[in-house]
Amino acid sequence: MTPETVVQIIRHAFMTTFWLAAPLLIIGFIAGVLISLVQIATSMQDSAFSTIPRLVAFLAGLLFLLPWMLHRTMDYTISILGNLGQYAK
């Protein structure tokens, strides 16, 4: 296995991880900004009010995006295992 192949495998792993995490991070960021704006507008500084809606938004996003995330993970796994003979050289 050449160093270029190792770099390519690691790069592919990092990019797959990035694309799997990015939508959930964006959902959490948008939910956090919206909750903060509501807290500023209402002057409510309750910690439960800021935490629970973010968790609900994150969970809803996870449930909505789970089929897509599983598909991407399976594609990555199939590409790694399918090229296993090339990596052994």
Image (cartoon, rainbow, N blue to C red):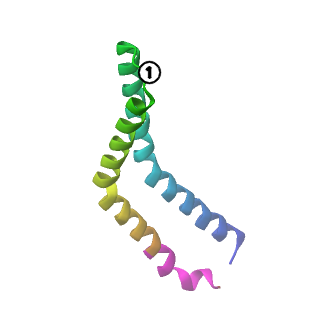
- Quadrant of the rendered structure where residue 13 is? bottom right
> In the shown orientation, is residue 17 left or right of residue 61?
right
- Quadrant of the rendered structure where residue 7 is? bottom right
> In the shown orientation, is residue 84 left or right of residue 58?
right
Residue at the outermost right position: 3
Q: Is residue 86 above or below residue 48?
A: below
Say whether residue 44 is magenta.
no
Q: Please provide percent x and percent y for residue 78.
A: 43, 75
Q: Please provide percent x and percent y for residue 67.
A: 30, 61
Residue placed most toward the observer, 12 or 71: 71
Disc 1 residue crowd, few under 14, some 14–19, many 20+, Cα 10 Å: few
Element assignment for label 1: loop
User: What residue is pinned by disc 1?
Assistant: 45
Taking the spot 56% from the left edge, 86% from the top edge, the residue there is: 85
Taking the spot 30% from the left edge, 54% from the top edge, the residue there is: 63
Q: Is residue 87 above or below residue 47?
A: below
- Quadrant of the rendered structure where residue 47 is? top left
Name the quadrant of the C terminus.
bottom right
Q: Please provide percent x and percent y for residue 22.
A: 45, 46
Q: Which residues are magenta?
A: 78-88
Name the quadrant of the N terminus.
bottom right
Say whether residue 84 is magenta.
yes
